[in-house]
Image (tube, rainbow, N blue to C red):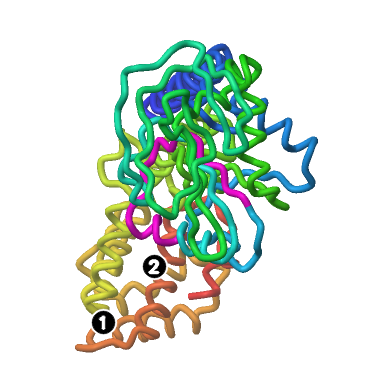
Amino acid sequence: MQKLTFFKGKWTWLLIVMLIIMVSSYFAEVGQPKKYPDYVSYSPFPTGVKAFYSYLEKEMDSVNKWTQPPNLLPASDKNQLVVMVEPSVTPNSDEIAEYITFMEAGNTILLLKENPRGLFDLRIMFNDEFSVPLTLADKNGRQYNSELESVVFFETDVQDEILLHSENGHPVALKRAYGKGQLIVANTPGWMTNGNILEADHLPILLTLIKEVNPETVFFNEYVHGQQDATSMVNVYPKWFSLVLIQGAILTCLFLWYQGKRFGMIVIPREDTVRFSDERIKALAAWYIRSRRFQDSLHIQADYVKLLLQERWGISYSKEWIDIERYLLEKLKGMPEAEIRSFLEGLSKILKEERLTKQEYLTWSKKLDQLRKEVEDNERTIGIPTREI
């Protein structure tokens, strides 16, 4: 019992420690300011683009976030716009092919990236000659001011249409046709960030690019910012809640491991002071039954009962069972003489058999056990239980 109490106390302290860790983790997570990636549509930080996203939500009928791979884009629908702002995860060749398929179906991708080299076969050049504010002009000659510097400009192909260019004529934004759709790319993603969108003419510049399409549906692509699995538990639930679930799973595993030391309930607790416990007796009995050594087991049981007869009632151990009839008649006065004689004759005969069936063994073992109980319990009413012999 002391050992059991020790284990209970140890597990109580372990539960308390785990509870303290979970609570402290929760408050540590809640107390920390939330962090957002740059250029994502749900970030209120100066580096996020939530302001422009919210503006389009009010001005347009359908503005959503896109967090799935490009092959799941609804290419069958037309006049859709996918906004990709400074992708932190560069699309591979297969994904680029999926985006091109999406555009060829009659849709548009607006890509804002400082250095888009390697994407959609875009070619760039570097020019350190710029002034701040930078004056830009669109294809209609309208001028815009930008307070953001850039040394990256585009090298255009014959089929490209320049949408914005600097005073020196360097392309800042261009449009390239893909089937029934097009790619619009600009070199300054900072125009769309919360901290810069209201500076200079950044908002009119963005609206000029959007009006090139006049889309019915706009998707802000968060897949390119690492949000590849928005339905997973890590993204759906708060981090502190996910941490609590992980710690709970570890605690459950430890608890099940501890419980697995024993399979099933303990029928009889083992006492430390028992020299020859019931567990050993049961193990020996089970071994005799599995080995079908019924005759040996019955002989051992009969010898044990004869020893009790000698110790308690003074009947000599050396006498045969058939010869102790008159002694049992004196002790078992409530039992008919015919039953005692039948029991002794049957026991003498069965002990001489070389083989016993399981049913015979169980029958005579039960009768011997009833006689043992009668001998050990002298206060029991004589005759009533022994009739089962």
What residue is pinned by disc 2?
A: 327
User: Which mark is first along the chain, 1 or 2?
Assistant: 2
What residue is pinned by disc 1?
A: 351
Asked whether 179 or 218 is in front, the reply is: 179
Give residue 205's position: percent from left, percent from top: 61, 29
Asked whether 102 or 377 is in front, the reply is: 102
Q: Residue 343: in sight, yes or no?
A: yes
For image coordinates 42% across by 68% down, the residue present is 328
Would you place residue 189 above or below residue 362 in this image? above
Would you place residue 56 above or below residue 330 in this image? above
Amino acid marked by disc 2: Tyr
Would you place residue 298 above or below residue 91 in this image? below
Amino acid marked by disc 1: Leu
For image coordinates 43% across by 72% down, the residue present is 366
Q: Residue 24: in sight, yes or no?
A: no
Residue range in magenta is: 81-98
Give residue 276's position: percent from left, percent from top: 26, 46
Give residue 171's position: percent from left, percent from top: 43, 35
Place residue 170 in its image quadrant. Answer: top left
Q: Is residue 25 inside the magenta stretch?
A: no
Q: Is residue 253 left or right of residue 292?
A: right
For image coordinates 35% across by 41% down, the residue present is 155
Question: Quadrant of the image for the N terminus?
Answer: top left
Instruction: Indicate the secondary structure of the residue bearing disc 1.
Output: helix
Cα–Cα gap, marks 2 and 1: 20 Å
Place residue 114 in its image quadrant. Answer: top left
